[in-house]
Structures are given as structure tokens and as C-alpha cells.
Image: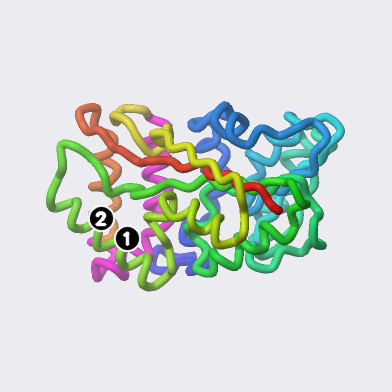
């Protein structure tokens, strides 16, 4: 894609996205995901919106006789995920191409369904959650991890940038259905889908929060907002203004005196 184009289905789509997802996973680490997912060794676990397969591989390694299945709608990401898992010698893993709102699996196929940073991109997220429930066995669980207020909470606050950031995310909501307040809505979505024993854990996002100064976090911010440059150009009226917005967010959130706060919600529900 040229700098003036963008993928409306997944705004971050780019030639670097699988590399970015792999590096982002290293920033996050695996401890929180495994702690809140708590996979058992025998389980069949589905990772919806697996991207590069980084978390799917973590799940597979945590299983014994169980199998981890990753699903993504982008064939090029699925191809990367398969090759990466094969290169690491992971055998209890598979990857499929498919849509989160129309999962290509029979009813009650999995003991657990997991997704991270997916549902904010899915305008039909209620349907996606219903699909998560459909393919989960009775007594199994669905776990989703999503941020809330990504990129719009920082202190000391730059009021000019703040107005532009809010404008950008409002445009993403109106045009693409992106929900930057999804974390707080997950418990209600789970309840409306008929799940019980809903648990909610909220932590400070270790990738998109904290003081600036980490070069990996800076690279992640820069790569993401380079990927969305076409959309930023549409929001602000030109490529040049889109580049200015990209540069401002990278520089501001990389400053060691600026604290960025982004809550990360882990929500789990039991399927009846």
C-alpha cells in the first residue's frame, strides 16, 4: 500500500506487522496472559485473531496433550504463523484462516477461547463473542484481553496533541467501528452472551503505558502510526499533517518525563 492508502478491515496492516506483533509480544511478556488464561495441559484452546501466532505458540508450550489453534482473517499472517511455529519445532499447534464473526469450527469444539487486542477492531463484536461461546464446550471458558483509552491518557498533558488524538480516535470509531473504550464494556458483552462466573482483572498495560524512554516501546509506537499514516492523512487533511501527528505521538510518548496510562482488561466467562 502507498502512504495514502489503508486497510479498513485492519488499520495496522503492513509488511512489518508480523515483526511488530512478535516484538510487541516480547514487551508484554507471557506471565499475565498465562496467569489469566490458566490453560490446563489437556485442553483444546482457540486463539482468535492470532496475528503472527506469538501468543498461540505460548499457549501450545503451556499445554501437554492439548492443542492450540490460531485463527486470523489475514492469510499472510497465518502463513507466517505456521512457518514460525514449524521453525520452533512446536507440533501441538495449528493455524486456520477465518472470520471471528463466523468461526469455521463446529459447536463445542474447544475447552477455551482466547483473544487479545482483537475485539476493538471488530464492528460486529457482539456476534464475535456469541461465536466464541458457540464453539466452546459447556463448562469451558472464554477469555478476552483488551485495552481501554489507548493513546489518549498522559500526564503532563499536551492539550494540543490531546485534541488531535481524540479527533483521530473519534474518526476511527465513526468510519471503522474501532472501539477505544472496549475494555470496560467486555464484562457486559460477556453477560449478554449468556456467560456466567464472569471475572474482571484490570492492570496497567505494560506495553502502552508507563514513562517513556524504552527504545522498543518507541519503535512500536512509531511502526504502528506509520502503518496508519493513510488514515491519519484522511483525518487531518494531508500526508504532511498525518506525518506531523505520527511524529508528535512518538516523541511525546517517548519522553521520560511523560507518563502514559492505558488500562488493560482481562475478562473471563464460563459457558453454560
Q: Which residues are magenta?
A: 215-241
Question: Is residue 190 found left or right of 214 in the rendered image?
Answer: right
Q: Horizontal and vertical percent for residue 56?
A: 69, 41
Q: Horizontal and vertical percent for residue 186?
A: 49, 53
- Res. 261 image quadrant: top left
Residue 159 visible here: yes
Residue corresponding to mark 2: 165
Residue 51 visible here: no
- Res. 263 image quadrant: top left
Classify 10 Å Cα crowding around label 2: few (below 14), some (14-19), many (20 and above): some
Classify 10 Å Cα crowding around label 1: few (below 14), some (14-19), many (20 and above): many
Colouring style: rainbow
Residue appearing at x 29%, y 61% in the figure: 168
Is disc 1 in contact with disc 2, using a CB cutoff of under 8 Å?
A: yes
The foreground one among 208 and 264 is 264
Residue corresponding to mark 1: 169
The foreground one among 178 and 187 is 187
Amino acid at each position: 500500500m502507498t502512504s495514502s492508502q489503508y486497510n479498513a478491515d485492519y488499520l495496522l496492516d503492513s509488511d512489518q506487522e508480523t515483526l511488530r506483533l512478535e516484538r510487541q509480544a516480547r514487551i508484554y511478556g507471557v506471565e499475565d496472559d498465562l496467569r489469566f488464561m490458566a490453560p490446563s495441559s489437556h485442553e483444546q484452546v482457540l486463539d482468535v485473531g492470532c496475528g503472527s501466532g506469538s501468543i498461540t505458540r505460548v499457549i501450545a508450550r503451556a499445554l501437554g496433550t492439548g492443542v492450540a489453534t490460531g485463527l486470523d482473517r489475514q492469510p499472510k499472517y497465518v502463513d507466517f504463523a505456521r512457518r514460525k511455529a514449524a521453525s520452533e519445532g512446536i507440533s501441538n499447534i495449528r493455524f486456520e484462516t477465518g472470520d471471528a464473526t463466523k468461526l469455521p469450527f463446529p459447536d463445542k469444539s474447544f475447552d477455551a477461547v482466547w483473544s487479545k487486542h482483537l475485539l476493538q477492531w471488530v464492528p460486529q463484536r457482539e456476534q464475535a463473542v456469541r461465536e466464541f461461546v458457540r464453539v466452546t464446550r459447556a463448562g469451558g471458558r472464554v477469555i478476552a484481553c483488551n485495552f481501554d483509552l489507548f493513546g489518549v491518557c498522559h500526564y503532563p498533558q499536551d492539550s494540543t496533541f490531546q485534541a488531535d488524538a481524540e479527533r483521530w480516535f473519534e474518526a476511527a470509531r465513526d468510519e471503522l467501528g474501532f472501539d477505544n473504550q472496549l475494555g470496560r464494556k467486555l464484562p457486559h458483552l460477556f453477560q449478554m452472551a449468556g456467560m456466567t462466573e464472569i471475572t474482571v482483572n484490570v492492570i496497567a498495560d505494560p506495553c502502552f503505558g508507563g514513562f517513556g524512554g524504552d527504545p522498543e516501546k518507541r519503535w512500536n509506537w512509531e511502526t504502528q502510526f506509520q502503518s496508519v499514516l493513510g488514515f491519519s492523512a484522511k483525518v487531518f487533511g494531508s500526508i504532511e499533517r498525518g506525518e506531523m501527528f505520527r511524529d508528535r505521538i512518538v516523541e511525546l510518548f517517548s519522553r521520560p518525563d511523560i507518563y502514559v496510562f492505558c488500562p488493560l482488561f482481562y475478562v473471563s466467562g464460563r459457558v453454560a
